[in-house]
């Protein structure tokens, strides 16, 4: 009994130590947002700021000729709309491919979605630029939202969930005279709420952090988001580490807090593939 308690205490100690090790960079970023650049360079490992001053947050109120509020608005708008569109499209597509797997062209669409998981955005720069140029969407919010709405991972999660739904449930709804749309909205989607919440959160977090596709599609800083503004600030201010860290805090902490609040729902959604009748 004593040996088990010692092992448990040792396990907790290792877990806490590992957690602190991974959290330290975020703590250092938060502390550095309140320290002048000269203080950061002279004592970079100081675990707390000399004084708490929020002046730097007013100094970064305008970056690259654009107000910081514009970047915040762009991040919220682009991320929210692209997440909503991605969840709707991938859910409907996954349901259609699950219900009619032998329909003409559906197999190619499915494999196309899965193959794109292996390709990073870097390899899609030229094709994306050409497509957006042909469609007249370069420099527009619509072009950025449409590109970020592409969700192969989301499609895969929805498909795996829909495949686990017992056929008896669908057949019972068909016997009762339900249409395909009624089956989807009144039977399948209520059962898919956990995975829908999970996919929505994952998509929001992924799209919030995107910067490369936005730089490719955008033509001016007016459509930049916070991650892109962070890159612009890095080149604009040079060695102003305090300003960079302050903007990094504004960029990362909201989504980190969102994940911490919703992590239980994420775990439930990941386990939702084990649905049983």
Image (cartoon, rainbow, N blue to C red):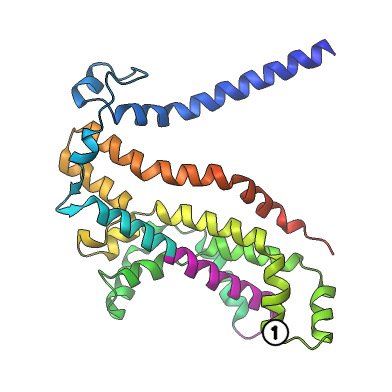
Q: How many marks?
A: 1
Query: In the image shown, does 215 or 112 lie closer to the viewer?
Result: 215
Quarter-of-image position of residue 99: bottom right
Image quadrant where one finds the N terminus? top right
Q: Residue at x 71, y 56 (%)?
A: 272
Residue 42 vertical position relative to residue 231 in the rendered view, above or below:
above
Is 105 included in the stretch rendered in magenta? no
Q: Residue 102: in sight, yes or no?
A: no
Query: In the image shown, does 226 or 215 lie closer to the viewer?
Result: 226
Image quadrant where one finds the C terminus? bottom right
Q: Residue furthest left?
A: 65
Q: Which residues are magenta?
A: 81-104
Residue 211 vertical position relative to residue 249 in the rendered view, above or below:
below
Q: Residue 192: in sight, yes or no?
A: yes
Q: Residue at x 26, y 64 (%)?
A: 218
Most common secondary structure along the magenta stretch: helix
- Location of residue 206 in the rendering, given as x and y in whole percent from the top left corner: 46, 54
Query: In the image shown, does 8 or 131 lie closer to the viewer?
Result: 8
- Location of residue 251 in the rendering, given as x and y in whole percent from the top left corner: 36, 45
- Location of residue 42 in the rendering, given as x and y in whole percent from the top left corner: 23, 17
Q: Residue at x 66, y 58 (%)?
A: 194
Q: Residue at x 67, y 70 (%)?
A: 189
Is 87 on the left-hand or right-hand side of 251? right
Residue annotated with mark 1: 180
Residue 143 vertical position relative to residue 55 in the rendered view, above or below:
below
Query: In the image shown, does 147 or 55 lie closer to the viewer?
Result: 55
- Badge 1 element: helix
């Amino acid at each position: 009994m004593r040996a088990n308690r010692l092992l448990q205490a040792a396990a907790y100690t290792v877990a806490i130590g590992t957690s602190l090790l991974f959290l330290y960079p975020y703590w250092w970023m938060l502390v550095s947002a309140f320290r002048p650049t000269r203080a950061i360079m002279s004592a970079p490992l100081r675990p707390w700021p000399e004084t708490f001053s929020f002046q730097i947050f007013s100094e970064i109120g305008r970056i690259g000729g654009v107000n910081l509020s514009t970047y915040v608005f762009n991040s919220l708008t682009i991320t929210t709309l692209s997440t909503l569109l991605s969840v709707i499209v991938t859910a409907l597509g996954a349901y259609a491919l699950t219900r009619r797997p032998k329909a003409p062209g559906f197999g190619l669409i499915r494999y196309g979605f899965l193959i794109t998981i292996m390709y990073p955005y870097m390899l899609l720069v030229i094709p994306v630029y050409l497509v957006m140029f042909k469609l007249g969407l370069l420099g527009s919010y619509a072009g950025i939202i449409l590109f970020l709405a592409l969700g192969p991972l989301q499609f895969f999660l929805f498909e795996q969930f829909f495949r686990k739904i017992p056929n008896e449930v669908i057949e019972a709804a068909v016997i009762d005279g339900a249409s395909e749309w009624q089956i989807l909205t009144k039977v399948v989607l209520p059962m898919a709420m956990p995975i829908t919440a999970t996919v929505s959160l994952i998509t929001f977090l992924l799209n919030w952090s995107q910067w490369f596709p936005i730089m490719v599609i955008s033509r001016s800083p007016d459509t930049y988001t916070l991650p892109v503004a962070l890159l612009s600030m890095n080149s604009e201010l040079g060695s102003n580490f305090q300003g960079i860290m302050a903007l990094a805090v504004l960029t990362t902490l909201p989504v980190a807090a969102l994940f911490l609040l919703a992590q239980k729902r994420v775990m439930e959604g990941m386990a939702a593939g084990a649905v049983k009748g």
